[in-house]
Image (cartoon, grey):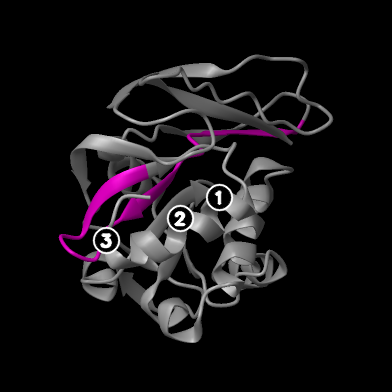
Amino acid sequence: MRTKILAPAIVATAALTLSACGGSDSGGKGDNAAAAEVKGGQKSGQAIVLDQAKAKPDLALTDTDGKKYDLLKETKGRPTLLFFGYTHCPDVCPLTMSNVGLAVKKLPKAEREKLRVVFVSTDPARDTPKRMRSWLDAQGGTDFVGLTGDFNTIEAAARPLGIFIEKPKKEKDGSITVSHGAEVVGFSPKDDKGHWIYTTNATADRYAKDLPKIIEGRNP
């Protein structure tokens, strides 16, 4: 298995670069550069506060119960974290979800019930609802929403957010390359728009510190 992280070009007070994340057969290949531009923000690991908020994707996919999940409807008026990744990912995806999971567990029950954490598969052919549920639970995300479905639909939803993903590719040696942006987008309950982005450098402590403010719709 091979993973490539598609990194956005970030215009901020400090340049943020996502390094490649790969398994043992990554072959030393470097990152792919995406053409997205994100303005605003602080140094790496902290929330990037967007100058222009991003619209929440109009996305309907299949959840881990095998039922249709309408993202706009189900998360309307709720603080939401959205991440695109896949369950066979060797490092970045499980690290990101486990960091968020650790942070969520520190929240009071009332705040946990308000928050929605949504994981959308970038490898839907392999990420069945059952597999996604088991994987999310293993990362500490028993309350996380897992979505899978048509790849083109998923890719089209990610692109306007500045998150670029490519269709999984089977290599000659039988390995599968999955390329995807690894940002977590935070949506405010006040206007249902994405105001914050976290890169792979964000720690569990960072999320734990910021989530109470995001839940209230305030900048971290």
Residue at the spot 37% in from the left edge and 61% down from the top edge: 213
Q: Earlier in the sequence, mark 1 or mark 3?
A: 1
Q: Are marks 2 and 1 in contact (CB under 8 Å)?
A: yes
Residue 127 rendering spot, x and y as whole percentages: 58, 58
In the foreground, 74 or 48: 48
Q: Are marks 2 and 3 in contact (CB under 8 Å)?
A: no
Tell me the element at label 3: loop
The kind of residue tagged 3 is Gly
Magenta stretch: includes residue 205: no
Residue at the spot 68% in from the left edge and 45% down from the top edge: 89
The kind of residue tagged 1 is Arg
> Spatial distance from mark 1 to mark 3, Cα to Cα?
17 Å
Is 118 left or right of 196, judged from the image as shown? Answer: right
Is 76 left or right of 99, judged from the image as shown? Answer: left
Q: Which residues are magenta?
A: 174-196
- Residue 155 visible: yes
**Where the N terminus falls, by quadrant?**
top right
Is 39 left or right of 212, judged from the image as shown? Answer: left
Residue at the spot 51% in from the left edge and 37% down from the top edge: 199
Q: Earlier in the sequence, mark 2 or mark 3?
A: 2
Q: Are marks 1 and 3 in contact (CB under 8 Å)?
A: no
Q: What residue would you read off at disc 1?
A: 206
In the foreground, 20 or 50: 50
Residue 95 rendering spot, x and y as whole percentages: 68, 49
Q: What residue would you read off at disc 2?
A: 210
Q: How many numbered markers are drawn?
A: 3
Q: What residue would you read off at disc 3?
A: 217
